[in-house]
Each structure stands twice: as structure tokens, then as C-alpha cells.
Amino acid sequence: MKAPLSLEGFSDLLTVVQVASIFGIAKSTVWNWAKRLDGFPKPIKLGKRITRWKKADILAYIESK
């Protein structure tokens, strides 16, 4: 049985580096998934160069798989 994923140390908004580390993938793969993978959570633009993902969206995506 798979242990439940805990993102307790993370804030409610995740950076691309944090999302990449959760999935064990490269940052470029996160961007690729966000663009092309149906169902993968879309990022939120907070500024010109600031993008985040909702932690709840990432957890929901993981649970759906």
C-alpha cells in the first residue's frame, strides 16, 4: 500500500521547483505537462515572472492517478 503524500512543509502555493521535486521530474517537464497534459493543474500567474500552482490542485491530481 502506498503511503499518503504529505506536503506539510510546503505553503499553499508551490513553485515550479517544488512541483518538479514532488513528481521527481525536471522543471521543463512541469511546464510541458502544464501545457500539454490533460488534467494536469494549470499554473497561476502572480506577476510577470511569478507563477505558482495551488497545492490542493497538485494533491487532487496525484489522488486522481
Image (cartoon, helix red, strand yellow):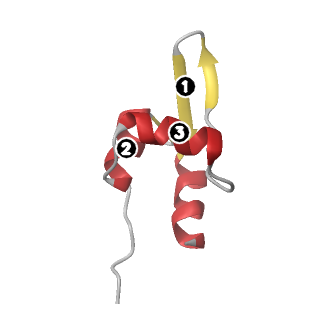
Position of residue 18 relative to residue 40, above or below, is above
In terms of sequence position, does the residue under pointer 3 or pointer 1 come before the other? 3
Q: In this view, does 14 lie to the left or right of 36?
A: left
User: Local crowd at mark 2 within 10 Å, few (<14), some, or many (≥20)?
Assistant: some
Q: In this view, does 11 lie to the left or right of 35?
A: left
Mark 2 lies on residue: 20
| Label disc, if present, on residue 32 of the rendered structure | 3
In terms of sequence position, does the residue under pointer 3 or pointer 2 come before the other? 2
Q: Which amino acid does label 1 sit on?
A: Thr
Task: Please give the name of the residue rendered at 36% of the width and 52% of the height, measured from the top-left corner.
Answer: 22
- Residue most toward the top? 48
| Label disc, if present, on residue 2 of the rendered structure | none
Nearer the observer: mark 3 or 2; the answer is 3
Q: Which amino acid does label 2 sit on?
A: Ala
The residue closer to the viewer here, 33 or 57, is 33
Label 2, label 1: how far apart the Cα atoms are: 13 Å
Q: Is mark 1 on a helix, strand or loop?
A: strand
Task: Please give the name of the residue rendered at 61% of the width and 20% of the height, measured from the top-left corner.
Answer: 46
Mark 1 lies on residue: 51
Q: What element carries label 2?
A: helix
Residue 65 location, quadrant: bottom right
Label 3, label 1: how far apart the Cα atoms are: 14 Å
Q: Which amino acid does label 3 sit on?
A: Asn
User: Local crowd at mark 3 within 10 Å, few (<14), some, or many (≥20)?
Assistant: few
Nearer the observer: mark 3 or 1; the answer is 3
Query: Would you say residue 11 is visible in this rendering?
Result: no
Q: Position of residue 60 (x, y in %)?
A: 59, 63
- Residue most toward the bottom? 1
Q: Is mark 3 on a helix, strand or loop?
A: helix
